[in-house]
Amino acid sequence: MRTTTSPNPSASPGRWRRAGASLLGTAALVLAGLGTAAHADAAPTTPTATPSKVTWAATPCATPKHAGELACDSFRVTGGTTAFQKAQARRTGDTAQVTPKAAAAAPTGYGPSDLQDAYGLTDAAATNGDGETLAIVDAYDDPNAEADLAKYRSFYGLSACTTANGCFKKVGQTGSTTSLPSADSGWAEEISLDLDMASAVCPRCSILLVEAKSASMANLGTAVNRAVTLGAKYVSNSYGGSESSSDTSYDSSYFNHAGVAITVSAGDEGYGAEYPAASKYVTSVGGTALSTSSSTTRGWTEKVWNTSSTEGTGSGCSSYDAKPAWQTDTGCAKRTVSDVSAVADPATGVSVYDSYGVTAGWYTFGGTSASAPIIAAVYALAGTPGSGDYPASYPYAHLGTSSLNDVTSGSNGTCSSSAGYLCTARTGYDGPTGVGTPEGTDAFTG
């Protein structure tokens, strides 16, 4: 289970991650699959003919294995009726629900066509992405990564992406295809989520999986550098931890890559900034709740993802990183999180196929670990960034235009009234959702 400190109007320097050691006592519960969302009933949900409340648990990698490690930003649904299932029930009358702790025989979350439709990407996904390499950076090894990805892509009718055809490549942080980190079932869930989201949004992209030997910032940062060295122009990172005075040095060592779109999940603990989402060189990605809507021309509606005071999309004001030139909000003197957003609420979660350390089958995931690779894939559809550009700046040039879906409802916590936008959605820029969610690719090209 996660532990948090009280939200701070500026940042949360005492946030739980990187402290690791204090969490080991609860790690066994999470590893055993017994942790649940703060709002959820711990008792298994019994399927009924009517929709029931969705429950979920943090994935095991959300609790650091060792002191000083960072954590993934994901949750796995354990019971109830997801938004995808509710929409399916309206179409077909199928009232199936997620069964706690058991894989489903068919998807229970949003798939590629849903995500492409929600974000105006259907045409771009069908034609763009050839020759683009999208990198996924995670810790530890998923031995089943390629096989599970094949299951996902085959089910949804996406072209094969394998080592043999040159579309998929897995390496360790040294670049070796044979010297890989030790396997970890928790991070394998995260890897499956990230690979599937990259495929869902940019099915024609090549995928490079770079596995750090541990979840330390040094090793994950080295993996980011490796991804760039190997040619990736789009690098997704679905992890984070509390800010520290070392972050500016990490910026220059690992994230200062002009001409590369680096996305980072904003965090899952509600209001408060975390790193590396707070790096001025990355696109920090917040999270929304995404649902179909018959009352909008878009056919979808979004609001800030927030489950409780300690669970929801991250946002806030960095304590250490300088504000990049393209951010002009006045309530935060330093870097403001987030820049953009996409679906992250587990109740409106995404479909993932996973088999390592769990019953092989379909799961539904949420957390900003889902939104970060989605946005990296949108950048890939938009095309190679300018060689001297920091692509985090691109969406700001389209603020208030039809190239973005402005998310204007919801909040992720409590912040000062003088800078309420840091935790509350509004028209225009706000912390939880940034400048909005994609509507096509125009806002993600220079």
Image: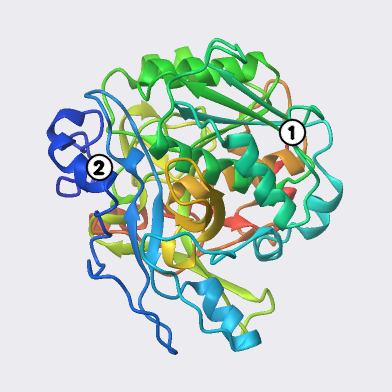
Front residue of 214 and 279:
214
Which residue is pictured at 15% across the width and 28% down the height?
21
Front residue of 69 and 213:
213
Q: CA distance from mark 2 to mark 1?
A: 45 Å
Q: Is residue 116 left or right of residue 314?
A: right
Q: Is residue 319 visible?
A: yes
Name the residue type under label 2: Ser
Where residue 125 appears, as percent x and y from the top left, is 78, 51
Query: How is the model colour-coded?
Result: rainbow
How many neighbours does mark 1 have within 10 angstroms: few (below 14), some (14-19), or many (20 or more)? Answer: some
Q: SS for tag 2?
A: loop
Badge 2 is on which residue? 10
Quadrant assignment for the C terminus: top right
Where residue 6 appears, as percent x and y from the top left, is 15, 49
Which residue is pictured at 21% across the width and 34% down the height?
13
- Closer to the chain start, of discs 2 and 1, is 2
Front residue of 22 and 142:
142
Which residue is pictured at 74% across the width and 33% down the height?
162
Where residue 401 appears, as percent x and y from the top left, is 67, 59
Name the residue type under label 1: Thr
State which quadrant residue 80 falls in.
bottom left
State which quadrant residue 296 falls in.
bottom right
Q: Would you place residue 311 above or below residue 140 in this image?
A: below
Q: Would you place residue 419 above or below residue 161 in this image?
A: below
Q: Would you place residue 367 above or below residue 387 in this image?
A: below
Which residue is pictured at 41% across the width and 69% down the height?
99
Q: Is residue 79 left or right of residue 437?
A: left
Q: SS for tag 1?
A: loop
Label of residue 162 in the image: 1
Q: Would you place residue 237 above or below residue 347 in this image?
A: above
